[in-house]
Image (spheres, coloured by chain):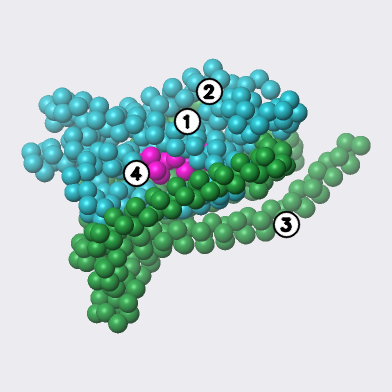
Chain colours: A cyan, B green
Amino acid sequence: MEPVIDNLDLYVSGFLRSLGIALWGAVGALLLGTLLATFRVSPVPVLRRFGAAYVGTIRNTPLTIVLFFFAFAIPPAFGLPDADYYVLGTAGLVVYTAAFVCESIRSGVNAVPSGQAEAARALGMGFRQNLTLVVLPQAMRTVVPPTGNVIIAMIKNSAVVGAIGVGGDLFSVYNRLTSAFGYPRLPIITGTAIGYLVMTITAGVVLVLLERRLAVAR
Amino acid sequence: MSQPTAVLFDALGPRALRRVRLFTVLAAVLAVAVVAVAVARLAQRGQFDAELWAPLFDPTTDEFPLVWERLGRGLLWTLAIAGTAMAASVVVGVLIAVARLSLGRVGRLPLVAVVELLRGLPVVVTILYVSIALPEVGLDLSDNWYLAVGLTLYNCVIISEIVRAGVVAVPRGQVEAGRAVGLTDRQVMNGIQLPQAFRSMLPSVISQLVVILKDTALGAIVLVGVSELARQGRQLRNALDNPLQMFLVIAVIYIVVNLVLGKSAERLERRLSRSRGSAAEEVVDEEEGVRA
C-alpha cells in the first residue's frame, strides 16, 4: 500500500472531485426525476406519454452508451469542442439516473392510500394542490428508501463517468500514477476502490439513519 | 392510465379540458422548438450528410457488410458474456445465500464482509480490479473473461441478497413442518425453503438479469480487448468518425434486446405464477381445512 500512502494528497483531491460528480449528479437527478414523475401522473396525456417514453428508453440503454453520447457524440455533432467533460459526464449521469428516480417516486405516489387523494378532491383541490399539499408530502417518506438506493447506485455509476475520463478524479489518479509514474497497478487501483467504498458505505449509513427517522407508523 | 394515479384528479370538466389543451399545445410547441433548434444545429454541422449514415444503412456501400458483421459479432459476444455472468451469478448467489443462512453468527462474518465489500464497489472498478488482480495470481485470461468474472462478482452478491430475502420470507410453519416430519436442515433448505423462495424472488432476479446485460457495456470503457457490442461500436466510430450515428444504432440495438429480454421474462413469470398460483391456493385451502 506504500504507493497509495505516498500519493495520499492526489487521492484526496481525486476523491473530492469524484464526490463533486456524485453530489451534482444527485441534485440534478432528484430534480429532473421529480419533474418526470409529475409528468407521469399529470392529467395532460402528452406529458404522460413523454414521461413513459423517456423512462422506457433510458432504462433499457446501458449507462455506458448514454455517457458515450455525452462524451463522444454530442460535442462534435453540436459543435461544442471545448465542452467540459466534467459537466457533460455529470449531465449524462443525471439524464440516466432521473429515469430511475422518476420510477421510485411514481411508485411512492401510488403507495399513498387513495382515500387521501379522494379526500383532497372532495375538499375541492385541483391536481396541483392535491399533488403538492397532500400526496407528494406523504409519498416523500415512503419514497426515501427506494430513492436512496437509486442514489447509492448513482454514486457507484459516477465511477463510470470518471472511468471515461474526467480529469482529476479517482480514476484519473489511477491512470496517472500507473501510466505516467509507472507505479504497479494493483495497489493503485486498490486506493481508487477504497475511495469509492468510503463514498458508498457512508451513503448507505446515512440512508439507514434517514430511513429510521422517517419511518412511517402505519 | 393506471387506477392509483387517476385518483389525483377528477374527470375533467370544460375548464380543466381547456387547460389540458393549453398545456398540450405549450408542450408540443416547446418540444417542436427544441427539436427544430437541435436539427438545425445538426444540419449546420453536416450531421445529416449521407456519408455519415451510409455505412450503417446503405447496403451498396463497401463498409455496410463489414460494419454489420462487426456489430453482429459484438452483439453475440455481449449475449455470451451476459449469459455466462447470469448463470454464474445465480449459481454462486444461491451458494452464498445458503452459506450465509446456515453458518453461525461468527462463521458468516467473513462472508458478510466480502458481500458488503463487493456490494459497495462500483462494478466498473470491480471489472478493472479483476483484470489487474487475476494475472497477478497467475490467471491469464482474455478481457472477455475478466468482464464476465467482474460482472459475476458483483451480481452474485446482489442475487444472494435477493435469495436470502426470499428464504427468510418463507413462512416459519413451512420449516417447522419439514422438521416435524424428520427432514434434516439440508433437506428443509433444498426441498422446502429454496423452491418457495425461488417463486417469490423471480421478478427481482429477472430485473437483475437485464442489469447484467446492460453492464456488459462497461467493458468497453476499462478493458481494451473485449469483443462486446459497445467496444465494437467505439472502434467503428474511430474508423468511420460518425459518433452520433454509430451510438444511436448501438443504443437502439441494446434497447431492442432489453425489451425482448424483459418481455419474455414477463411472459415466463406470468406462466409460472399462473401454474403456481393455483398450487398455492390449494395449499392455503388445505391448511384452512385442517384448521377448521
Q: Position of residue B204 (x, y in %)?
A: 55, 45
Residue at (21, 25) in percent of width and height: A12
Q: Nearer the viewer, mark 4 or mark 1?
A: 4
Which residue extends farthest right? B292
Q: Nearer the viewer, mark 2 or mark 4?
A: 4
Q: Amino acid at mark 1?
A: Gly
Q: Position of residue B116 (x, y in %)?
A: 41, 32
Q: Are marks 2 and 3 on the same chain?
A: no
Closest to the observer: A44 or B274?
A44
The reply, left or right, for residue B76 in relation to residue A70 is right
SS at circle 4: helix
Residue where numbered disc 4 is placed: A92
Q: Are marks 3 and 4 on the same chain?
A: no
Closest to the observer: A70 or B208?
A70
Residue A72 appears in view:
no
SS at circle 1: helix
Residue where numbered disc 3 is placed: B275
Residue at mark 4: chain: A
Q: Badge 2: how crowded within 10 Å, few (<14), some, or many (20+)?
A: some
Q: Are marks 2 and 4 on the same chain?
A: yes
Q: Amino acid at mark 4?
A: Gly
Q: Quadrant of residue A19?
A: top left
Q: Amino acid at mark 2?
A: Glu
Q: Quadrant of residue A1?
A: top left
On residue A148, the disc is: 1
Q: Position of residue B16 (x, y in %)?
A: 66, 40
